[in-house]
Image (spheres, rainbow, N blue to C red):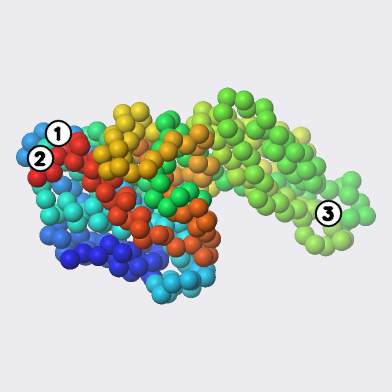
Amino acid sequence: MFNPILFRHRLHKHPELSGSEKNTRDVIVKTLSSFGLDPLSDIGGYGVVVKFESREDGPHLLFRADTDALPIHEIPCHEHASTVRGVMHACGHDGHSASLMALAYKLSLTELQRGSVTLIFQPSEENGQGAKAMMKDLSWQKTKFHYAFGYHNVPGYPLGQILCRNNTFACASTGVAIRFVGKTAHAAYPETAINPTSAIRELMLDVEALPQAISQGFTLATIVHVQLGKPAFGTTPETGELFVTLRSDSNKCFSALCEQVKQLASFYAERDGLDLSIEWVDSFNATINHSEANMLLRQACKDLGFDYVNLDNPIRWSEDFSEYSKEWPSAFFGLGSGSDHPPLHDPRYDFPDALIDVSSKIFEQIIRDMNGLK
């Protein structure tokens, strides 16, 4: 008898960072194989895919969970604490994987009446690379997907409450590292330097003001790091760095925001004779929900008698499930982790085990409604 809670605790004890989920892959493959299933592994990195098929034509549904952990040192309040110093499942991907594994176990005990179902355990969500890598790997995409589904736990909402939203569920975001390089000089002769100070100072003010100029949707520019020169009183700065996180609920506004930041940095570099480099880090598109897929999600909640609410505003953080929602009609939802639960990416965070049953039942009900189960 499979116990999804113990499965989650096992993953929690042995977390692995994005791109390093080798042991996690092995545990997932071994568990699926113990159900009598034949999973594909090493898809887009350490991704695992398992498919269930019927003999009758029907819809092909996709369900996804993420598997990677974060570089955070856990402050445990439980017995299944991370055994890897400085790495923990602080975002609940161990719970998401347990939910999908519970669904795989249920599907292994029954048969689809029509169509097919594919489950994917996806690596490297935290750095925005996993979904893109899996999408590039066509070895598992043999037939068209009609709908795709996924979820994320969300602290701050009642335990088990389903959070739905039409259109944008989670924002687009990226980190941008802007580096100016000039020429240092003796502090007594600053006029002989090529100094990035003015460029950094003015760019900071401009970047913070950008969201006010974009009225079509929600946008946000958050300065997260600034560095100028070295702590030496005898020399002027040669280099300046500005790190900013950009986000928006609209992919169109997001693209405009990124382009304006690029243009501003280029303007100041050219004006002041500075060399410029721009690096984009951990880029995510907005996760857009499709009306038909959302209808299927809400119907499953109604069938189960589960409490669900419609969010007025999108979640501000990002999800690389957006890569699937760009390709196929999708519904991505939130699941309340508790009103007083520690936030995501907190060293005290631990995924609530009760959510495994709730989420796997929602997935199973969608399959019952669409494919039928014998």
Q: In the figure, residue 230 lies in which quadrant? A: bottom right
Q: CA distance from mark 2 to mark 1?
A: 9 Å
| Front in this rendered view, residue 181 or 41 | 41
Viewer can see residue 86: no
| Front in this rendered view, residue 59 or 300 | 300
**Badge nearest the viewer, 3 or 2:** 2
Provide the secondary structure element on which disc 1 rests. loop
Q: Position of residue 125 (x, y in %)?
A: 41, 51
Residue at horizontal 9 percent and vertical 45 percent from the top: 374
Residue 295 position (above or below residue 281): above
Q: CA distance from mark 1 to mark 3?
A: 69 Å
| Front in this rendered view, residue 188 or 366 | 366
Q: Which comes sooner in the sequence, label 2 or label 1?
A: 1
Q: Are marks 2 and 1 in contact (CB under 8 Å)?
A: yes
What residue did someone put label 3 on? 236
Q: Amino acid at mark 3?
A: Thr
Q: Position of residue 306 (x, y in %)?
A: 33, 44
Q: Position of residue 287 (x, y in %)?
A: 43, 37
Q: Which comes sooner in the sequence, label 3 or label 2?
A: 2
Residue at horizontal 78 percent and vertical 50 percent from the top: 183
Q: Amino acid at mark 1?
A: Gly
What residue did someone put label 2 on? 113
Provide the secondary structure element on which disc 2 rests. loop
Q: Amino acid at mark 2?
A: Gln
Residue at horizontal 93 percent and vertical 55 percent from the top: 188
- State the residue lying farthest toward the left: 55
Residue at horizontal 70 percent and vertical 38 percent from the top: 208
Q: In the figure, residue 113 lies in which quadrant? A: top left
**Badge nearest the viewer, 1 or 3:** 1
What residue did someone put label 1 on? 58
